[in-house]
Amino acid sequence: MDGGIEWLVDGHGCAPARLRDRASVIALLDQIVRDMDLHVVSTAVHVFGGHAGITALYLLAESHLTIHTFPEASLATLNAYCCKPRRPAAWQVLFAHHLGAGDALVRELSRGAPR
């Protein structure tokens, strides 16, 4: 069975102010949706108070897209899961542009492969 593809992306060296900024985080997710031709069914976004970060979820027709930001560590962690194979987003470029990331570690996983 083909269970699709999943990307785990860790953005390092991000600008802490952008990791606390709802507009910056949503702009990143919206760009990923456009670039990967995804279809949003529903969204949930929570901005934590003070100097804490943001957690956001886009429920997709293709599965889901989530992000958690950690301003205190200049880190953003993203998970994109699609039930059908597709081309990945330009993760490094998008994280640098929207969050000021100095680097992005990208792991790509095929899902549903037999043991």
Image (tube, rainbow, N blue to C red):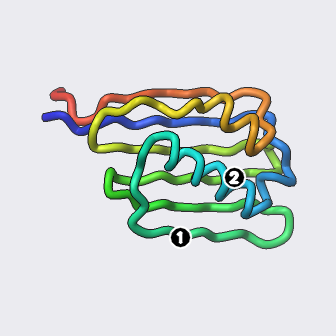
> Based on the displayed image, in which of its 4 quarters is residue 40 positioned?
bottom left
Residue at the spot x=68%, y=61% of the render? 54
Could you tell me if the residues under marks 1 and 2 are in contact, i.e. CB atoms within 8 Å? no
Q: Which of 93 and 21 lies nearest the eye of the viewer?
A: 93
Q: Which of 37 and 3 lies nearest the eye of the viewer?
A: 37
Q: Residues within 10 Å of mark 2 (few under 14, many from 20)?
A: many
Residue at the disc numbered 1: 44
Identity, as a three-letter code, of the amino acid under mark 2: Thr
Q: Position of residue 102 (x, y in %)?
A: 79, 29
**Left or right: residue 93 compared with residue 38:** right
Q: Position of residue 3 (x, y in %)?
A: 23, 39
| Residue 45 versus residue 27 in the image, above or below | below
Secondary-structure class at tag 1: strand
- Marked residue nearer the N-terminal end (1 or 2): 1
Q: Position of residue 38 (x, y in %)?
A: 41, 49
| Residue 9 versus residue 52 in the image, above or below | above
Can you name the residue that lies furthest to the left here?
1
Residue at the spot x=50%, y=68% of the render? 43
**Left or right: residue 98 compared with residue 61:** right
> Based on the displayed image, in which of its 4 quarters is residue 85 positioned?
top left
Q: Position of residue 91 (x, y in %)?
A: 60, 32
Identity, as a three-letter code, of the amino acid under mark 1: Ala
Residue at the spot x=58%, y=61% of the render? 56
How far, Cα to Cα, is label 1 from label 2? Answer: 14 Å
Residue 69, numbered circle: 2
Q: Assign the C terminus to one quadrant of the image.
A: top left
